[in-house]
Amino acid sequence: SQKLEEGVKNGKPTFSFEFFPPKTAQGVQNLYDRMDRMHDYGPSFIDITWGAGGRMSHLTVEMVKNAQSVHGLETCMHLTCTDMEKSKLDEALKLAYNSGCTNILALRGDPPREKEKWEATAGGFRYAKDLVKYIRDHYGNHFCIGVAGYSEGCDDHRDVDLLIDHLKEKVDAGATFIVTQMFYDVDIFLAWLKKVRAKGINVPVLPGIMPIQTHAAFERRANWTKCAVPASWKEALDPIKNDDAAVREVGKGLIADMCRKLLANGINHLHFYTMNLEKATRMVLEELNLLPDLETPLEKPLPWRQSLGLN
Ligand code: FAD
């Protein structure tokens, strides 16, 4: 977890990759292969999401265990309060602990698929801050605990100042880092960060970056999170929207410029929402000159497939 917080490795900025549990066995195997390759890019950690309402949660726990113990990847497990009474939270935390995982992203969670509104579960928690406090109370400093930050509002509230108050409560409850919702407009993020710091929130903030894979996915995600898209991005991407290769190439430049601006403003860590895909994230890292020499990786880890008997 120290790696996660230090921000700069060998004089270079650090980065991390988010993955989610795939729905099929083939998808899981493909993802393990991809994680194997992306391990060589040198992320300081990877994180695995927690399915809404605990869907696929067994797989989150299993993937965390494999990433951590088989591959020696620093791993962060997302954990949510949705449909999770305390005994289930205990079970998940114990499994993470036993697999050597020392990082948890503590979240309230999305509502389960079939429900529109989020509801607390009897014997569980209402807010992420309650989960943060619970983990601190029961595990001391074993876990480095992250929480979510929203520079442009979230589904429940668009009031950014109110959300910063709630963010402060999560940090005061014991969170030691913040991962933000994805965004494209760096100026909005930097203005938000200034407010966050002015509130006395001093823990590292890891900006959430969504590389551009296709135009449709780019638009869908911007609409879904309601994040602002700079006019110049629309002008660059709209005319080529039906050419996936061109969108990826231009998108790479836009995302890399966004990252350069973040780095120039003192942000030393980039957190990539990979959407379980490799290419677009790799292109951005290449463009930023952040990939190690892949011909001579420092230490070749055991391939996932072999070590899991999945050949
Ligand atoms: P909280 O910070 O607890 O906030 C929840 C709501 O309660 C907010 O509206 C907040 O303003 C309000 N609130 C908080 N404190 C108070 C208070 N004292 N009084 C009144 N209201 C209050 N979802 C998943 O299901 N699985 C995942 O793996 C996952 N990963 C994510 C990763 C990141 C980086 C981000 C940004 C989000 C992720 N989400 C995930 C989505 C997240 O669970 C939802 O956005 C959820 O709606 C809010 O979660 P939170 O942890 O921010 O909640």
Image (cartoon, helix red, strand yellow):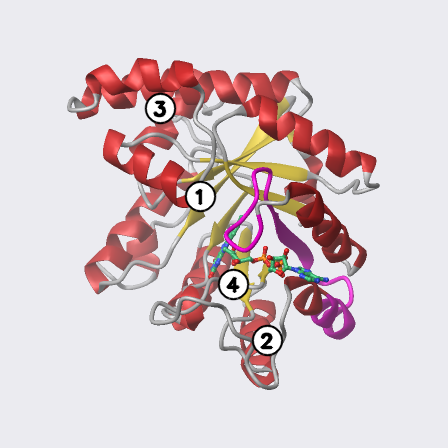
Residue found at x 38% / y 54% = 20
Some atom of ligand 1 lies within 8 Å of the CB belonging to the residue at label 4: yes
The disc label shown at residue 109, or none = 4
The disc label shown at residue 187, or none = none
**Structural distance between the alpha carbons of marks 2 and 1:** 32 Å
Label located before the other in sequence (2 or 4): 2
> Where residue 149 appears, x then y in whole percent?
62, 46
Residue found at x 45% / y 52% = 71
The residue carrying mark 3 is 283
* Left or right of 180 in this view: 18: left
Residue range highlighted in magenta: 133-157
Element type at mark 3: helix
The residue carrying mark 1 is 225
**Structural distance between the alpha carbons of marks 3 and 1:** 24 Å
Vertically, is 290 above or below 308? above
* Left or right of 243 in this view: 7: right
State the residue in front, 46 or 170: 170
Label located before the other in sequence (4 or 3): 4
Question: Can residue 139 be seen by looking at this rendering?
Answer: yes
Amino acid type indicated by mark 2: Lys
> Where residue 302 appears, x then y in whole percent?
38, 50
Amino acid type indicated by mark 3: Met
Amino acid type indicated by mark 1: Thr
The residue carrying mark 2 is 94
Label located before the other in sequence (3 or 2): 2
Label located before the other in sequence (3 or 1): 1
Element type at mark 1: helix
